[in-house]
Image (spheres, rainbow, N blue to C red):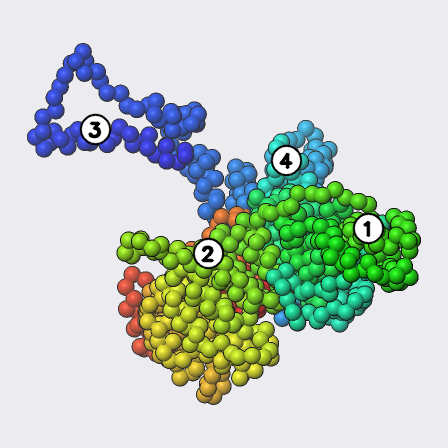
Amino acid sequence: MASSTDSTHSNLKDPLVSHSQTRQENGQHIAESSSSEAPTREPPVPNLHRLLRGKGREWEAIGAKPRPLQLLDLPVDILRLIVKEVTHTNDLTSLALTNSTLYYLTIPHIYARFDIVWPDDTVPPSDSKNVDALTYGLATLCLGSKFAQRTRWLRGSSLARSKPSQRLADNQYAKYTRKFSLGNGPKDWTSEYMVTKESGKMLGTLVAIAVGKMVNLETFVWDMPTGVLSEVFMALASLQDHYPEGESKLEKVWIRWHDNSEVPDASSSISSPIQPPPPPPLAVPSVGSTVTTVGNPLPHDFHPSVTQPIKYSESQVEYPTFSVLPPLKSLTVLDIDELAYLDEMSVLIERSRSKLRELRVGISQKARMADFAQAWDSYTLHQVDHDARWPGESRIGDRRLGGVLGVLVGRIYDIRRKSAVKIQEKEAADTVPEQSSASQSNGVENLGSAPNGLHLLVQHMNIATSSQAHLQNQQQTNGATVLGQTTVRPCAERKRLDGKLQLETLELERVPLSVQVCTRAIDWSVLTSLTILDCMFVEHLWKSLKRQYHPTPPAHGSPAGAPTQYHLALKHIHTDTTSNTLISFIRETLAPNSLEVLFLQDRRRTSGPVVKLDQIFKGAIKRHRLSLKKLLLDSADETQEVRRWTNWMLNSEIVSYITSGRMPNLKELSVMIDYKDWHPFLQRLPNIPQLRSLHIPHMLEHLGTFEPKEMALQIVDIITLRPEIQLCYVGIANKCFEILEARRNDISSGGSDAGLGGNHGNGAIVIDMDDDNEDDGSEADEETEDDDDANDDNSTGSQADAGDDLTDVSDDAESETDSSREGDLVGSAARLRLREILFYDDKVAIFKARHARL
């Protein structure tokens, strides 16, 4: 780059001269030769021109200046690198107001991220005049050059022939935005923007206009459960029109759906809100009573009714949504309560099959028992309707083969090995000999007792039900039943799909698992992160994975010491249903010291034996002690009953092991301990100096009043004595604290603390500068659920700093011992401060995982 090139050229001759003089002073003889024998060595100017990359004139202009170089005299490339190192939005704004050159360099960083962060509902409202940051921020992105044109016209009319400021020449700020995010907030505030209300329609329109101008958009997040208009999806799809090859920069889409139910209280509804499934025509086994590798088996003679297409005007679901998006690298869709969303997601997954690396799917709490959310198994069912042009044309009903996962992979993987028509023909051939002795009247009765879907099929295709041709009609009916369930018109046989998703991250919430889809439609040799929360049939998944991917021992005759071959690459496991099967899977299927993140919770267990802590310790923790970076153990349920959370309370032996230094990579820890082990834990804390985040949700047998702040102050005392400890975030019970380092001059002048995340006040908007800006004090940047979200301090600083309680560890009444200890610090005048904050869920993985939800 220009920065390294210029400095190299400026000092190019000096080292040569000084080196020659040094050799002469040391008495070394330098041979002199004539120009004919050895030509004079020229400085490598051609190499310099090659490194300058066509910027020689700029270098000559800088070198010709008689005065010393100033900041603005530096090349633009160097200035751009300097501006990139500025991490706070307020500093970037100050630079933009300083000089026109700095203005043009800082504007792309200021508008690179547009994050709407709602204040916490516990923060009291401010009496000062506030601006609706959401509306005004979107207006800034939407107005664009029209505002600049009007400003230039107004200034030109008031001041004759005056040239307007160059800053107003172009203010298309949206073209710099690379991440657009609407976060979730208090329900009372976000409900005003529901898609069914006028304000929600206005918000969706503004977002669609702004997104249509974000030609460099890479990440789109809508985590506010208010609904997303189809115009927003169309705007995201239009981004690829700005590129000649039709490939936009959009890589990540995160959508949290709203409640489509018309019932005021959505929590009271447990079935599909728009089109509740009709009662089954035949008796259906209870969900989970029996299960196959595909899902819940239906009766052998079950035939679903044929659903009729609906008009677009009759649909109560936004269309189009995911089906128009370009290929994505990361797709997250949460709180799904409509089958139409799954059908459109299947189209997007097919389009992104070679690019998709992250998939997160969550079913709404009220829709988890709906027919479309269950995993079904029957030869009469289908995954998707390949002939439907949009979800409203689907004729195959709500019950789908393989459930949610079967629909998602329905266009890249076929669960059914054989054609349903061939299965029906084979069964019909087996039943013909048994029916050959039946009378004609019985034949008419059998046909009359067929399911409703068969009646519709017979009526539509005008099939004669003559009693004289009963056997022939019976075979035709059996062969045509399945065709009628997929589509009324006959369809040609298609090639069987057998694709796989090359996922690296898979996260599921309230999704009944289809073991066949999980094991056959996903490449587990690539998957590194797995999160399964409140999902049925998870036990069958662990058993199947253990059986299918059992490690291969060295072949007979292999040399001594040949390693065992492991077939899985899992490094991250998070589940809220812990069982002995899972511990056995971790112990026997994963390579030793390969698991980096282990979050085990036991919230979904209602009965059955409890997994003992000793089994978890020996089967998972000790086996992966050298690789574990983040560990969470929580046996509590929603009721927080003492009997539950004490099941996994660490004993003295395990506390000593974790704090012995035998887990050198451990950076985040969330466990429950006994108060008698608290002080031994503090004494051994210097053995794990790399620990950055600590969470203790419960503590047993605490004497007196339980004060989280006092316990956090005890940790600060240990860090003061042993400054090599890197602990920064401490969560105790329902309180969270940040340990800061404040310089003496900051304390005396009342300046801001040196820590993670700046205070942005009570505003609801954070517009950050760059996804690549990392905070050196945050270890959460190494591993995160979201690569772009966790590397930014400002996106979470606003939310976390709202209502901070800043407390100095050492007050005015500190003892002489504390004063002398502070004065003995060599080369540093730092003091530690403790600040109460909200939990950094976006920056610290154990804080986010404690909720056990996506």
* Mark 2 surroundings: few (<14), some (14-19) or many (≥20) residues within 10 A: many
Q: Nearer the viewer, residue 292 or 688?
A: 292
Residue positioned 67% across, 36% down in the render: 241
Residue positioned 18% across, 16% down in the render: 38
- In the rendered structure, the answer to whether residue 37 lies left or right of residue 459 reads left
- Residue 530: give x, y in percent of width and height: 53, 60
User: Residue 246: which disc?
Assistant: 4
| Dot 2: element | loop
Which residue is farthest bottom? 704
Q: What is the spatial separation of the Cα atoms under label 4 and label 2, in whole angstroms?
A: 36 Å
* Between marks 3 and 1 in the image, the one whose residue lies nearer the viewer: 1
- Residue 524: give x, y in percent of width and height: 51, 54
Q: Is residue 155 above or below residue 853?
A: above
Q: What is the spatial separation of the Cα atoms under label 3 and label 1, in whole angstroms?
A: 99 Å
| Dot 1: element | helix
Residue positioned 79% across, 54% down in the render: 478
Which numbered disc, 4 or 1, marks the residue that appears first in the sequence? 4
Q: Nearer the viewer, residue 270 or 253?
A: 270
Which numbered disc, 2 or 3, marks the residue that appears first in the sequence? 3
User: Residue 402: which disc?
Assistant: none
User: Which residue is labeled 1 in the image?
Assistant: 476
The amino acid marked with disc number 2 is: Leu
- Residue 644: give x, y in percent of width and height: 54, 81
Q: What is the spatial separation of the Cα atoms under label 2 and label 3, in whole angstroms?
A: 60 Å
* Mark 3 surroundings: few (<14), some (14-19) or many (≥20) residues within 10 A: few
User: Residue 568: which disc?
Assistant: 2
Name the quadrant containing residue 550: bottom left
Name the quadrant containing residue 373: bottom right
The amino acid marked with disc number 1 is: Gln
- In the rendered structure, the answer to whether residue 474 lies left or right of residue 78 reads right
Q: What is the spatial separation of the Cα atoms under label 4 and label 1, in whole angstroms?
A: 48 Å
User: Which residue is labeled 3 in the image?
Assistant: 17
